[in-house]
Amino acid sequence: MFPGKHLTHSYRFKAVIAGLILAAFASCTAVKNYPAGKPFVYQTNINLIGDFSNKEKKELAASLKEQLDDSMQARRLEKLAWQVLKKPPVFDSANAEKSMIFMKALLKSRGYFSDSMGYRPVVIDTVKKDQYRTTINFYVRPGKLVHLDTVAYNLQKQELQHLADSSQKSAFVKKGDPFDKNLISEELDRLTELYRNNGYLKFNRDELVGLWDTLDVSLLTPTLDPFEQLEILQKLRLRRENPTANLEIRLRNFDSTRLVKYYIGNVTIYPDYRTDTAGLVPHVKVVEGITVIQHHNKFKSKIFPPNIYLPHDSVYRQRRYVRTINRFNGLGTWRLVNIDAIPRKTADTVDFIIRLTTARKYSFNANLEGSINQTTISGNLFGIGANVGVQNRNFAKGANIANTNIRYGIELGSANGRQFIQSKQVSFNHTIYFPRFIPSTKRIPDRFRDNIRSFFSFSAANTERRFLYNQTTVNGAFGWEYSRRNILWTLKFPNIEYSYLIKRDSLKELIKVNPSLANLFTDGFISSIVSNLTISGGKNNKLNVLRINFEEAGLVTGLIRNKFLDSQLYRFVKLDVEFARLIRFPKASIAMRGFVGAGYEFDFTRDPEKRNNLPFFKEYFSGGPNSMRAWGLRRLGPGSSIKPFTGSGSTPDRYGDVQLEFNAEYRHPLFTPFGIKVNGALFTDIGNIWFLKGQGHSPEEVFNINRLGKDLAIGMGGGLRVDLNFFVIRFDYSYKVKDPSPTPDNASLQNKWFAYRFFEGGQFQLGIGYPFIF
C-alpha cells in the first residue's frame, strides 16, 4: 500500500526540517585535513531494529560501535562550543563490510544467532566544493535472543563435581539466562578459582571447556506419523519464537597430575632478601612454625607469623596465598613481594618460600603552598606555607610507619602602602602507624584484621596573629583506622589537647568595648573522643564522597573535680556532615558540595567564659579560596550582623558554632598550551556561619531557621585551573551577589541583589588544588 499525496508532502516537510537540523549540527564541527574531492567518513550511526528498552538499546548500540573498523570511525576533538574532526578516513565499502563481520561476531557472543544487517552511506555536499561528508548508517536487526535451556556440569572427578553442584547459587550462568559468552567465560574463571581455593594448586582455566548446542536432536528424528510430524512442526515454531541453547561445562583433558589436592607444608621467609648475600652469615629463627632467615637483622622475627596466612597442614587455598602477598605489599615496608609455591614430588604437600625486598627506610618530601585574598576594601592578604616531612618505613624494626612533618607559614597583608606580617604559624607533627590492632586481641574477626591499623600522634603548633594573640597548642592522641573497600573510619580515644592563649593589647582593647569577644578568645583543656567516617562510591560518570565527623569533649572527664579542670576544661559536642558529587561529561564536569556542621558547648561547663561558644580554634569560619570565595578568609558572618573589622566595636575575625554551605562548579576545558591543560570554571557559593546561643550575641548573629533566607550569602564567579598533573593552580574571581554581613560603610547594600559595583564587590582568590573534595 502506497502513501497518499498528503502523506508524501508530510514526509518531504519532515525531510527538509531534518536536513536543516543536520546542517545546523554539521556547522558545529570543523573539518581539517580532509581528503579533497573524495567522500570521507564524517559520522557513523548504529540503528537497532527490534524490541529493546532504551537502556538495552543504548548499551548494545555502544558495544556495536566499538566493533567498527578504525577506518569507519570519525573521532572528534571536543572544544568548548564546537568539535574538530582531523584527518577523517576516506570512505571505503570494504571497511564497512569488515565492520559488519566484527559486529556479527559480537552479536553471536551475546546470544543473537539469527541477526541481519546492512548499511547505507549518505553523502552531504558542503559549502566547500571539494568536501564530501559521508554519514554511514548501519541497520542492525539482532533477531531473537537465545536463552539457556539447561546448564550442566560434567567434571568426572567426584569432589570437583560436588564443589560445582554445591556452589550453583553463585554461578554466573543459570537456566533461563540469556546466552552470553562473556558470562560463560566468567563462570569458567569462577570454577577455576573455586578449585584453587580448595587445594587444587595446579588447576588452571585451560582444564575447563564450555560446550553449547542450539539444536534439539529429537527434532531431526524421521517419522511417518502425521500427528508426530505436526508435533515436531509445532516444536520448531516455538523454538523459532523462543530459541534456546544447552550448555555443558566439562574437563577438557583428564590430567591426573593437575587434579592433586595439596596441603600446606613448611613456610620460610627472607624479610631482607638480596641477591648479593655471599659472605653474610644468616640469622635463622623459627617463630610459630615459620622459619625466618635474615642477613642484616633489620626486623623483629615475631612480626611475621601474624601477617602470613598459610597455616601448616591445612588445605591450600589461593585466597590465603593472595592475601599474604597483598598484606606485605600493603605495609609499605617492602617494595617487592615474591612467594614461590614448591610442591613436593612424592607427597600432596606444598612448601612456600617468601622473599621480601625492602624499600628505602627513609623518604623525604617538601612542598610549597600559597593563597591570595584580595579586595579593594580590605586590602591584600597573601599566604605562603612550606612543609617538610620525613617518613620511616620500619620504625622500631616492626614494619611500622612513622611520619614526621614540620610546617611554617605566614600571611602577609598591606595597609597604607606598607607590607606587614598578618600572621605566622609553625607546627610539628609526628605520627606512628602500627599495622595491627593494639592491644592485641583474637576477638576481631579474621576478615577484618588486615583492614585495621593503630596509630599514635603528637603535634605542637604556635600561631601569632599581629596585635591580637599568640596561641600555643599541644595535642596527643591514640586511635585506630579501619579501611575496607570504599570505607575509611578512624577513632581517636583518647584525644588530649591543650591550648594556651596570650592576648595582645589590641585584642584586650577590643574585648573592653565588645565583651562578647571574651567568650570567643579563650584557652583551655580538651579531653575528647573523635570519630571520622568517609564513604566513597558512585557508578559510571558519577562519583560521590560522604564525610561525617564527630567529637565529644569533657562529658566523662568533667566528672572529675579539681581546680585545673574546673577552670580549663571544655565540655561540648560537635558534628558536621559533608557530601560531594562529581558528574563527568565527555566535554565537561559538574562538581557539587554540601556542608552542614554544628557545635554546642554545654551549659554545665564550669568556667562561665567557656559556656556560650565553642573554643575559637574549634569554631567554623567561612570565606577564602576553599569556601565562600566572594569573601576573604574569616570575613563572612555571623548571620546578618554588620560590624567593622577594625576600630571600636569591631570583630577582627568571624567565627560561628554553626555553618551551612553549598558549592557548585561547572568545569570545562579551554586550551592546552605547551601540553599544559588549562580548564575554566563557573561557580556559585551559598552559605554562612552563625552562633548557636544568644548570650552575648545580637539576634542577627544567632541561627534562626526563620531567618535562613535572609542570612544566606551568595557569591558567583569564574576561574582558571592550570593542571600541572602533580597539582593544580587555581585562579578564581567571585562577586558578592547577596551580602548579609557587609561592613558599616556598605550597610545600605545589605541583602540587596547585585548591589556592589563589580570590582568593589569582587574577590580574587589563588589556591592550590580544587576548592573542595573534587
Image: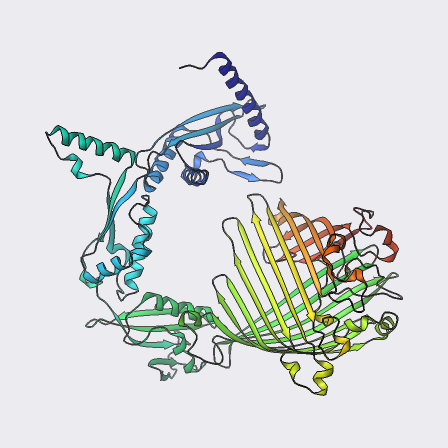
Position of residue 174 in the picture relative to residue 305 (left or right):
left
The furthest residue to the bottom: 562
Figure check: 278 above or below 713: below
How far across and down, in percent of the image, does residue 491 sit? 56, 72
How far across and down, in percent of the image, does residue 392 sit? 54, 75
Please say whether residue 769 is visible from this viewpoint: no
Q: How is the image coloured?
A: rainbow
Question: Nearest the camera: 641 or 320?
Answer: 641
- Where residue 704 sits, quadrant-wise, is bottom right
Question: Nearest the camera: 524 or 86?
Answer: 524
Please say whether residue 405 is visible from this viewpoint: yes
Q: How many marks?
A: 0
The furthest residue to the top: 5
Figure check: 471 above or below 177: below
How far across and down, in percent of the image, does residue 260 sit? 21, 66
Figure check: 454 above or below 152: below
How far across and down, in percent of the image, does residue 641 sit? 81, 59
Residue at left offset 71%, top offset 66%: 657
- Where residue 240 sits, quadrant-wise, is top left
Residue at left offset 59%, top offset 73%: 390
Residue at left offset 70%, top offset 83%: 565
Question: Nearest the camera: 632 or 274?
Answer: 632
Q: Quadrant of the C terminus?
A: bottom right
